[in-house]
Amino acid sequence: AVLTIDPNWSTFHPGESVTFICDMNEGKNTDWEYKIRRNGEQFMQSGQHKSYTLQPIKTAHSGEYQCCGVRKRISLTKCSGTVSLTVTAAQPKAKLTAGSTTIPVGGSVTLSCSVEPSAGWKYRWFRRTINTPEVQLTDEENRDINVKQGGIYRCVGVRGNTNFHSVVSDDVIITIRFSNKVVVTRRPNWPQMFSGETITLTCEVQGGETTEWSC
């Protein structure tokens, strides 16, 4: 007999679900009656159904699971090896990393969000600035995103279809680097001016269109 679990995660959290699947690899499924044991004791009996879904999971469901099949006609019993199931209420913390925290104008950077253990997580992304409130980036559930805007970013992991979520990551600040040079000129460019004369100061950003800048 072979026992598998779906989803095949190493760690579960309260409120999630897991399905035990017992394959006898012999005869028809209906030839067997199935039982599932936890820590050596009978946990449940599923009759002729080779799969059983446990929902919602509780921390008390942690343990070593094993399935057994009883061949009804010949009183034959076969059992699988054990599968470990860990259920923890502890919230893991999301980790946000950036390829670089400084990018040039027009450039971009990849941000990566991860939660350990890594299986089954989707991600929500948030951005704010010192002048604007935080907003969720729409249609972004990927572990990696590409951003072109400066700002303060953070992420959180959401597991499966439940409301279980990780602790929010620490902030990562993305800064836009301006490589343009600002030059101030004066006209007339006399070394000495007298009271009552007129001088014009001009601010120029070299390498960019003047209409894009204010000085």
Image (cartoon, grey):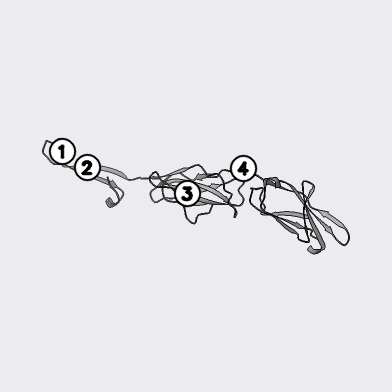
Disc 2 target residue: 185
The tag earlier along the polypeptide, 3 or 4, is 4
Quarter-of-image position of residue 179 = top left
Contact between labelled residues 2 and 1, with CB atoms less than 8 Å apart: no
Q: CA distance from mark 3 to mark 1?
A: 53 Å
Q: Position of residue 32 (x, y in %)?
A: 81, 60
Contact between labelled residues 2 and 3, with CB atoms less than 8 Å apart: no
Q: Position of residue 88 (x, y in %)?
A: 65, 44
The tag earlier along the polypeptide, 1 or 4, is 4
Contact between labelled residues 4 and 1, with CB atoms less than 8 Å apart: no
Quick one: which residue is furthest to the right in this view?
74
Foreground mark, 3 or 1, reads: 3
Q: Position of residue 65 (x, y in %)?
A: 75, 49
Disc 4 target residue: 90
Q: Which secondary structure, mark 3?
A: strand
The tag earlier along the polypeptide, 4 or 2, is 4
Amino acid type, label 1: Trp
Amino acid type, label 3: Phe
Q: Which secondary structure, mark 1?
A: loop
Q: Nearer the viewer, residue 80 or 107?
A: 80
15 sits to left or right of 126: right
Amino acid type, label 4: Ala
Disc 1 target residue: 190
